[in-house]
Image: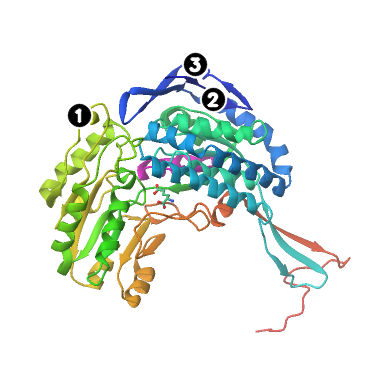
């Protein structure tokens, strides 16, 4: 079944001005057309920005607890439609149904959390250094936010960005990834059904080159929140500087799980299979490096090979499937080229090829792949592959482990399996990543703590949790002088310490 889907601008569903469209197809079966969507351009972005600007005064002046009530309603609607959204997501993006349900659940969690923030949005109240003077800071909305989202979490990541933007009083122009417009369109329909006023959220589908560029360039967009490739993030930063936009970037990862010799091996294996091959390895937080103590390297690799050999590849809608497709054929090619590099750099344990047999023939599938005995500086141990491929690097001592963990350009997530509490705390201090796990894989961050990474993973901002409020609001410091006379700060005050 195919349908025509449109942009949402100022509360109305409209076609792209050019009338052009593009199709979204299922990565599990390219004959399955999920829908046809507006191939928008700068004109459509212009209309979206105008609608968002027009909606800004009303939305930003609506008291934040009332904005929160709308988010509560949206959270409940998302929960009611969880199964429907999850099935659409599996069909359009490929992740297995259990994970798609988790993706929608994360959006529900963020909606509830941010709805509650509507009754806090705290600033500081501090004593003034002058008598009869009141000093405090308040959060203010900024304006129109441009939100550009990836395909790997088609509902959760838009929600991470959208709900804090809204609770802070901003209005939004959103562009979904070209691979997952249907998920975003359905998500936005539910926002409207939840009572979001016209123009508060505007959806513009289309390519990065047209829609994304126009959002980044538009002078009336004050904020950009982007998740995707590091190179794109750098380019966005560069271009957004021309109009002094505030930019939050969530970029690549090369996340390690360290397995120490005293680790609970069964737990480590369960966690590695989940962190490396869940979402077919297409998470920014996927464990694409396994740093394993040399004394247990061979035993661990053999046990992991057995586990991975048992993984069932297939359509994520089939409950028996463990690993779904990757997003499209270009991804299959990219992963295959890394597998070819890996064969020259390390020992191929299992996988290494696209999977095209039988029912997989019409989709974009890649065999779950393990490389072992890799050097820490091998390309497959340094570069983000974004597929079901993980690389085992043997290690001899702790100092070397810390160096290897920190040797990549990214710093999103890291994990350590050990029973040694001292090492656990050392890892928290010394692994240079924004997320750190102990006896748990690299994936599974929750909605109420900051999410983000160090180094080339981003530009220092954090998503979700209270940290997201800091990105989507501007501080105003307020002084109320009720002394009735001129009091000059730093001058007309009693100096206790005269130096
Ligand atoms: C991502 O890795 O692309 O921590 C997002 C997790 C999820 C979000 C991941 N809550 O695995």
Residue at the spot 35% in from the left edge and 23% down from the top edge: 32
Above or below 209: residue 58: below
Corner quadrant of residue 74: top right
Badge 1 or badge 3: first in the primary sequence:
3
Tag 2 secondary structure: strand
* Front position among marks 2 and 1: 1
Seen as rendered, the residue at the extreme top is 19
Residue 41 spot, x, y in % from top left:
48, 24
Q: Secondary structure at mark 3?
A: loop
For mark 1, what is the residue? 358
Q: Horizontally, is 247 left or right of 391 in the view?
A: right
| Position in image of residue 184 (x %, y %) | 49, 33
Where is residue 310? Give x, y as percent: 21, 47
- Which residues fall within the magenta stretch? 224-244
Residue under circle 3?
18
Q: CA distance from mark 1 to mark 3?
A: 40 Å
Q: Which residue is mark 2?
A: 7
Q: Can you see residue 490?
A: yes
Indicate yes or no whether the magenta region holds residue 239: yes
**Residue 241 rendering spot, x and y as whole percentages:** 49, 43
């Amino acid at each position: 079944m195919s349908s025509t889907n449109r942009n949402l601008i100022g509360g109305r569903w409209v076609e792209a001005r050019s009338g052009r469209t593009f199709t979204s197809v299922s990565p599990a079966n390219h004959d399955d057309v999920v829908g046809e969507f507006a191939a928008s351009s700068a004109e459509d972005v212009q209309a979206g920005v105008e609608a968002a600007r027009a909606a800004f005064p009303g939305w930003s002046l609506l008291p934040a607890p009332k904005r929160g009530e709308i988010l509560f309603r949206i959270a409940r609607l998302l929960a009611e439609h969880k199964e429907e959204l999850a099935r659409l997501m599996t069909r359009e993006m490929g992740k297995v149904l259990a994970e798609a349900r988790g993706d929608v659940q994360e959006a529900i969690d963020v909606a509830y959390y941010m709805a509650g923030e509507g009754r806090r949005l705290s600033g500081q109240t501090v004593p003034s250094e002058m008598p009869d003077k009141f000093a405090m800071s308040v959060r203010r909305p900024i304006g129109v936010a441009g939100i550009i989202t990836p395909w790997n979490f088609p509902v959760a990541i838009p929600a991470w960005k959208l709900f804090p933007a809204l609770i802070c009083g901003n209005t939004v122009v959103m562009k979904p990834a070209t691979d997952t417009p249907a998920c975003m369109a359905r998500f936005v329909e539910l926002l409207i059904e939840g009572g979001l006023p016209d123009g508060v959220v505007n959806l513009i589908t289309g390519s990065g080159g047209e829609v994304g560029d126009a959002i980044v360039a538009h002078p009336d967009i004050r904020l950009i929140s982007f998740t995707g490739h590091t190179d794109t993030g750098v380019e966005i930063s560069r271009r957004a500087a021309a109009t002094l936009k505030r930019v939050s970037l969530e970029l690549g990862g090369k996340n390690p799980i360290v397995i120490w010799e005293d680790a609970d091996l069964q737990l480590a294996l369960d966690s590695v299979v989940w962190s490396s091959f869940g979402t077919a390895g297409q998470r920014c937080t996927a464990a694409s490096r396994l740093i394993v103590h040399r004394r247990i390297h061979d035993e661990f690799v053999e046990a992991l090979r057995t586990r991975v050999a048992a993984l069932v590849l297939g359509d994520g809608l089939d409950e028996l499937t463990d690993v779904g497709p990757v997003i499209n054929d270009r991804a299959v090619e990219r992963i295959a080229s890394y597998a070819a590099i890996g064969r020259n750099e390390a020992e191929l344990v299992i996988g290494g090829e696209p999977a095209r047999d039988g029912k997989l023939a019409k989709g974009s599938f890649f065999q779950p792949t393990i490389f072992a005995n890799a050097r820490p500086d091998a390309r497959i141990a340094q570069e983000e592959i974004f597929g079901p491929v993980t690389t085992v690097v043997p290690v001899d001592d702790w100092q070397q482990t810390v160096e290897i963990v920190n040797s990549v350009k990214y710093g999103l997530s890291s994990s350590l399996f050990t029973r040694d509490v001292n090492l656990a705390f050392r890892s928290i201090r010394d692994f240079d990543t924004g997320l750190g796990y102990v006896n748990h894989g690299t994936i599974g961050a929750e909605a109420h703590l900051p999410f983000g990474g160090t180094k080339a993973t981003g530009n220092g901002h954090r998503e979700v949790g209270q940290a997201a409020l800091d990105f989507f609001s501007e501080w105003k410091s307020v002084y109320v002088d009720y002394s009735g006379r001129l009091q000059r700060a730093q001058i007309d005050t009693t100096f206790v310490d005269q130096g």
